[in-house]
Image: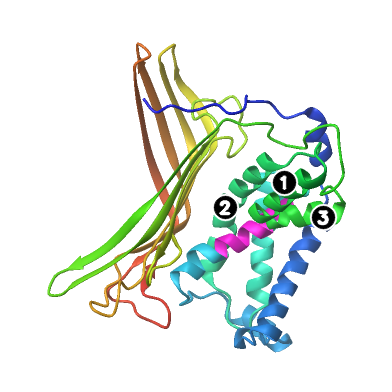
Amino acid sequence: MPIKLQVAPQVDPDSVDLAYYGKKHFWRAAGTIVGFNIGLWAFDRYVQNGDFARISLHSVKENFKHGFKWDNDKLGTNMFLHPYNGNLFYNAARSNGYNYWQSGLFAIGGSAMWEMFMECEYPSTNDIIATPIGGMAIGEVCYRASDAVLDDRTTGGERVRREVAAFLISPMRGLTRIINGDAWRKRSTTGRQFGTPSVAMEFSAGIRGLEFENEVYDSSLGFSMQFNLEYGDRFEVKSSRPYDYFRVRADINIVNSQPLLGQLDITGRLIARELLEKERSHMSIGLYQHFDYYDSDTISEVSAKCPYKLGIPASLGCGIMFRDIERNRWVLDAYLHSNAVILGSVLSDYYQVDERNYNLA
């Protein structure tokens, strides 16, 4: 059976930390989101000189008059960058005392502000769905990952390394800690809102190839890294907090003509109930949020073939987890998920408009 090496004992969060970081700061959260949107617009307008950033009162009026439409941006823009942007909105609130559901409302507000006010292009239907919902999935994963590296008891070089790491993982949390002074304030407790959780990680690297063979032979080889993470206990259902259990899988590729991020899968448990609890058998049922992203590009000009594209930033469904242990020697793990896709996209042979070669549904 796979062996999980325990490098640190699981520790519950300190009540002092929960009280200190659980205080809600509405204006700081809202101001961070508004400031970020204005800053991003200024960069697009005055540095990038983007036509879409030439906004005016007339463009705002036209946005409200016309309403939402489907846009034709690249898959990476619509299905990853927009959800990542939503993660920033989400964590602006999450870092200021709000929970998963409440922070999701801030993500909706931040996305709506951008769509209606900060572009002279008509607001996008797919963006207003993908940005907040996908942002909640990426956002909670990043928030909990940043929580694991922080330690308010440390000082000096170690403190700087921890704060920088947390900032890179969750920029809005790092920015909030700088604004309120927590980034350098020494405290008697760690400051972690989730204590020391149970985490299992797997990393692999090697050569990855894409190949097309029909009338012509075409292939592309390069370096690939894969990262798998399991956070929490899939059969611990006493807590009802979202994402006390989640799984993440990511592929990073350094392959000619291919995108850097090839795959990102997130499965996060929102609520769960126990169905079976015996000494050697466990079963639970729960509501799970899913984020799935698979991207490739044309292998080369030889065949001009794009192998696959798939983006599902907004998906929700029921999941059943089962485990059976036989005499402590064999472990059978099984799971089954049935999902409703709120917004999805897939490579199409029949839709080629601007930068978009995939269907939305």
Q: Is 89 in the magenta?
A: yes
Foreground tag (2 vs 3): 3
Residue closest to the eye, 7 or 16: 7
Quadrant of the snapshot with the N terminus: top left
Q: Going from the N terminus, do you reach mark 1 or mark 2 first?
A: 2
Foreground tag (1 vs 2): 1
Q: Secondary structure at mark 1?
A: helix
Inspect this view and state whether residue 361 appears.
no
Residue 210 located left or right of residue 314: left
Q: Which mark is residue 178?
A: 3
- Residue type at the position of mark 3: Ile
Q: Which residues are magenta?
A: 82-93
Q: Going from the N terminus, do you reach mark 3 or mark 1 first?
A: 1
Residue 259 located left or right of residue 306: right
Give the spatial CA distance, label 2 vs label 3.
22 Å
| Residue that appears at 34% across and 56% down | 207
Residue 88 located left or right of residue 230: right
- Residue type at the position of mark 1: Arg
Q: Going from the N terminus, do you reach mark 2 or mark 3 first?
A: 2
Q: Secondary structure at mark 2?
A: helix
Compared with 209, 357 (above or below) is below
Q: Which percent across, then down, holds residue 30?
A: 78, 60
| Residue that appears at 41% across and 32% down | 320
- Residue type at the position of mark 2: Ile
For disc 1, the marked residue is: 162
Q: Check if mark 2's residue and mark 3's residue have beta carbons within 8 Å.
A: no
